[in-house]
Image (cartoon, helix red, strand yellow):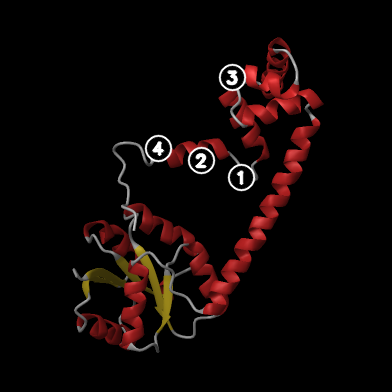
């Protein structure tokens, strides 16, 4: 197996000496560079082609997501592992929420350090059970909040439609043709076209795809959902680097 390529961002001290000694003695990893300042790290990280950056917690200042985002912008495949002493729960939650892939305490054994590196190199999250449980709880709470907002917006959206318009729109969402919709709700095709025309006018669109997207954007709790979708799809367009699955 090719060694995992590492860079380290830390203040020169005994803990750093011990960390580097462990890393240099292991065949599974290779330390490319050791940085002592954030500026040096950001200016040179693009030349390192590293798999993982190991960051001492003392080098970080809140809000952490800006620094992590800058690192990922330079190297989208770069994974972040934070290490330090007496890491408090709130700090650990914040760095994971901000984009770190894991953390280790300075008093962890050499075996655990290498295990953590191997683990996050596979795209997994290295964290203690209580941190994972809190993150899961946060995700569930956020999901419930978004669902509540979406439900309320859907109700408001429904309020602006007549019963027939709602019926027609329901079948439009399922991809039925005008003729098929007419058969489902026992109307003439001309009546269905009339209701479609009214829907287009209410949503200020001219065709069915625009109608669906407009309704989706009004209901979604995420602001500017359509540009977000477009940006995500553009990343998979020719010319963009896509990480292989697995």
Query: Picture coordinates of residue 160 (x, y %)?
Result: 79, 29
Q: CA distance from mark 4 to mark 3?
A: 23 Å
In the picture of the structure, the residue carrying the numbered disc 1 is 222
Local SS, label 2: helix
In the picture of the structure, the residue carrying the numbered disc 3 is 207
Are the two marked residues, 2 and 1, in contact with CB atoms closer than 8 angstroms? yes
In the picture of the structure, the residue carrying the numbered disc 4 is 234
Q: Quadrant of residue 193?
A: top right
Q: Residue at coordinates 44% horizontally, 69% vertically from top-left?
A: 125
* CA neighbours of label 2 inside 10 A, class few (<14), some (14 to 19), many (20+): few
Q: Earlier in the sequence, mark 4 or mark 2?
A: 2
Q: Nearer the viewer, residue 38 or 29?
A: 29
Query: Picture coordinates of residue 5 (x, y %)?
Result: 23, 68
Which mark, by number, is residue 64? Answer: none
Q: Earlier in the sequence, mark 1 or mark 4?
A: 1
Q: Residue at coordinates 59% horizontally, 23% vertically from top-left?
A: 208
In the picture of the structure, the residue carrying the numbered disc 2 is 228
């Amino acid at each position: 197996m090719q060694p995992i390529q590492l860079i380290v961002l830390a203040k020169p001290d005994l803990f750093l000496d011990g960390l580097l000694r462990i890393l240099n003695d292991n065949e599974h990893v290779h330390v490319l560079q050791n940085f002592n300042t954030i500026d040096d790290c950001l200016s040179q990280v693009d030349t390192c082609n590293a798999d993982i950056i190991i960051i001492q917690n003392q080098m970080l200042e809140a809000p952490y997501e800006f620094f992590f985002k800058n690192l990922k912008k330079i190297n989208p495949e770069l994974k972040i592992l934070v290490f330090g002493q007496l890491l408090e729960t709130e700090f650990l939650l914040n760095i994971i929420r901000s984009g770190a892939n894991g953390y280790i305490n300075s008093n962890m054994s050499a075996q655990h350090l290498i295990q953590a590196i191997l683990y996050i190199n596979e795209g997994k999250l290295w964290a203690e059970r209580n941190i994972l449980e809190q993150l899961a709880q946060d995700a569930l709470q956020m999901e419930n909040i978004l669902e509540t907002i979406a439900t309320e917006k859907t109700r408001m959206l429904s309020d602006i439609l007549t019963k027939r318009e709602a019926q027609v729109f329901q079948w439009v969402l399922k991809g039925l043709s005008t003729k098929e919709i007419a058969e489902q709700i026992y109307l003439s095709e001309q009546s269905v076209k009339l209701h479609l025309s009214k829907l287009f006018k209410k949503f200020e669109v001219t065709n069915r795809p625009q109608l669906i997207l407009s309704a989706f954007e009004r209901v979604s709790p995420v602001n500017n959902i359509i540009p977000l979708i477009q940006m995500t799809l553009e990343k998979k367009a020719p010319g963009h680097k896509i990480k292989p699955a697995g």
